[in-house]
Amino acid sequence: MDPGELEKRAARTEHTEHRAASPSGTPPPFSRSRVISQPDEKEEATRTMMSFIEGVLWLTLNIYHEARSEPQIGKLAVAHVTLNRALEKNQSVEEVVTAPYQFSWTFTKNSYLPREPEAFKECFRTALKAMISPDFTNGATYYHRKDIHPAWADSLTYVAQWGDHKFYRR
C-alpha cells in the first residue's frame, strides 16, 4: 500500500472513531489508529531499507566475482549492466544475479564468500557509485570477456569495451 493511501485510510478511521467524541470532527493528535499505523510505516521503512541493503550486497558480489580485477570503469560497467537488467525485467538485483546461467560465478563457485577483503571493499564502493551515477553504457544488458565470442552476441548491438569485457544491448 502506498504511503498516501495509508494516510487517507488512517484519516478515515480516525474521523470515524472520534466523530462522537470530537464535535468539530477533528481527530486528536494521538489517536488509537494513528498509533497503530506507525508500526506499519516503520515496518515498511525497514523492509525498504533491507531491500536496498540486499541489493547493494548482491550488486557488490556480482562486481566482485565478475570484474574485481578490472579497472574502475570495467567494474562500473558490470554494475550498470546488472542494474539495467533489474530495471528492464522489473526484478530485484538478487533475482537478476541469481537467475539461472546469467552470471557464471553463481553456478560455478562452491562459495559466494569473497576471499579478498580489499577487492570486496573496492567493489562495494563501486556498487554504491553505480547506484548514484548515470548509466554510461547506453543501456547495456549483456557482456562477455573479450577473449570469447558467445553465439548470443551476434544478435545484439555492440556498445563498447571497458576493461576486459565487451558490452551489448538489445
Image: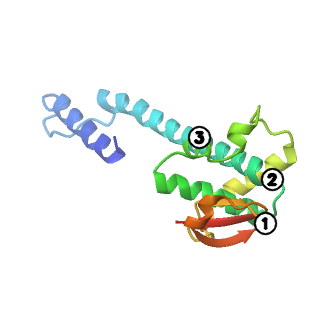
The residue pinned by badge 3 equals 100
Which of the 4 quarters of the picture holds residue 107?
Answer: top right
Q: Is residue 65 left or right of residue 44?
A: right
Circle 2 crowding by C-alpha within 10 Å: few under 14, some 14–19, many from 20: some
Label 1–label 3 contact, CB within 8 A:
no
State the residue in front, 136 or 161: 161
Q: Residue at x 62, y 71 (%)?
A: 158
Q: Are marks 2 and 3 in contact (CB under 8 Å)?
A: no
Estimate the spatial distance between the alpha carbons at disc 2 and disc 3, rounded to whole Å: 22 Å
- Compare marks 2 and 3 and give the one earlier in the sequence: 2
User: At 43% from the left edge and 30% from the top edge, which residue is drawn?
Assistant: 39
Instruction: Determine which residue is flagged by label 1.
Output: 163
- Residue at the image point whose x is 80% and y is 46% from the top: 120
Residue 153 tag number: none
Q: Quadrant of the N terminus?
A: top left
Judging by the rendered image, the residue that carries numbered circle 2 is 68
Helix, strand or loop status at disc 2: loop
Q: How many marks?
A: 3
Q: Looking at the picture, how far across and down is residue 102, in whole percent?
A: 62, 47
Dividing the picture into quadrants, the one containing residue 12 is top left
Q: Nearer the viewer, mark 2 or mark 3?
A: 3
In this view, the residue in front, 67 or 40, is: 67
Q: Earlier in the sequence, mark 1 or mark 2?
A: 2
* Front tag of 1 and 2: 1
Q: Earlier in the sequence, mark 1 or mark 3?
A: 3
Neighbour class for label 1 at 10 Å: few (<14), some, many (≥20)?
Answer: some
Image spot of residue 6 (x, y percent): 31, 40
- Find numbered disc 3 in the image and state the secondary structure of the residue it sits on: loop
Q: Amino acid at mark 3?
A: Pro
Place of residue 118 in the rendered image (x, y in percent of width and height, measured from the top left): 86, 48
Q: How is the image coloured?
A: rainbow
